[in-house]
Image (cartoon, grey):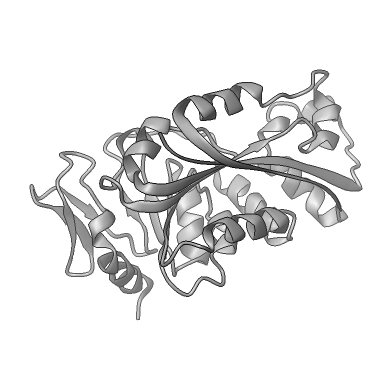
Amino acid sequence: MKKKEKSAMQMQRFESIFQCPVCTSPMKIVEYKSVVCDQNHTFDIAKQGYVNFLTRPVRSEYDKELFEARKTIIDSGLYEPLHSKVREIIGEVQSPKVLDTGCGEGSHLAHILKNANDGVGVGIDIAKEGILSAAKYYDDLIWCVGDLANSPYSLESFDIILNILSPANYTEFTRLLKQDGLLIKVVPKSEYLKEIRNLFYDETYSNEQTVVRFKENFQQVETYELSYKVPLHESLLQPLLRMTPLTWNKMDERKEVRITEISIDLELLVGRKK
């Protein structure tokens, strides 16, 4: 079976989650090749197995190299404690529908759901290169190019929304999350990737404003902190430098970078709709 057809079958199983980003009508999978709404707005399923729901051209600073680097780092196990904790949080939900917002190349979502027997994982990102990579490597999940400000999903479609080291759209999170659903937002703390930050920046990072915004928009249920250090193999240094915005437009300032270990310092904010 071709990847396009396999993806179409998975989308058809869960087609109730889709809503037309043009007119907000319900959508159906037609002939295993398109997602079509009641008003006949049509979005084709690409041969790679994803759907582009963007209704206008969008420029992204994130390119193929960045997403390949991010996959290399995530596959190395650097974030496994994070994935394990998220699996633990969502493990109590029966057959969960999980949406990863700003999913990039999909590695976080794929690792989190790697042993899931039921439910569905859906990833959305505005960067087409990220979704192309996600569809290439993880064909058992649903991948969409789309804008959260005009997303292709229907009201209260998801049990879990993941927002991992990515900007939030709380208005849309509230619309998409079921009444008893959970938002899991992962934010960096002051020691996150400090070995890289210390090379290029003098100031200390604080996530205080991000946490305040979360609490303004969602009822905080639980907070988890994950802080650990990982030995960094030489082969992972360049992918790590490539994937993080900390180094953008900064690499010329340091000709030689040597890092033998890296700090992961994260806060998991778990909330429900107010």
Q: Residue 221 in the image: x percent, y percent?
A: 54, 41
Kindly indicate the quadrant of the structure image that contains residue 9: bottom left
In the rendered view, tell whether residue 42 sits above or below residue 171. Answer: below
Instruction: Identify the residue at image location x=78%, y=38%.
Output: 193
Left/right placement of residue 192 relative to residue 5 reads right
Instruction: Identify the residue at image location x=66%, y=60%.
Output: 84
Q: Residue 175 in the image: x percent, y percent?
A: 32, 39
Q: Residue 46 in the image: x percent, y percent?
A: 32, 60
In the rendered view, tell whether residue 115 sits above or below residue 147. Answer: below
The mark tally for this picture is 0
Q: Residue 83 in the image: x percent, y percent?
A: 64, 57
Kindly indicate the quadrant of the structure image that contains residue 204: top right
Front residue of 38 and 145: 38
Instruction: Identify the residue at image location x=70%, y=42%.
Output: 242
Instruction: Identify the residue at image location x=89%, y=47%.
Output: 261
Left/right placement of residue 239 relative to residue 21 reads right
Quadrant of the drawing holding the N terminus = bottom left
Front residue of 131 and 149: 149
Left/right placement of residue 213 relative to residue 232 reads left
Quadrant of the drawing holding the C terminus = top left
In the rendered view, tell whether residue 1 sits above or below residue 3. Answer: below
Q: Residue furthest left?
A: 39
Q: Residue furthest bottom?
A: 1
Front residue of 269 and 99: 269
Left/right placement of residue 36 relative to residue 215 reads left
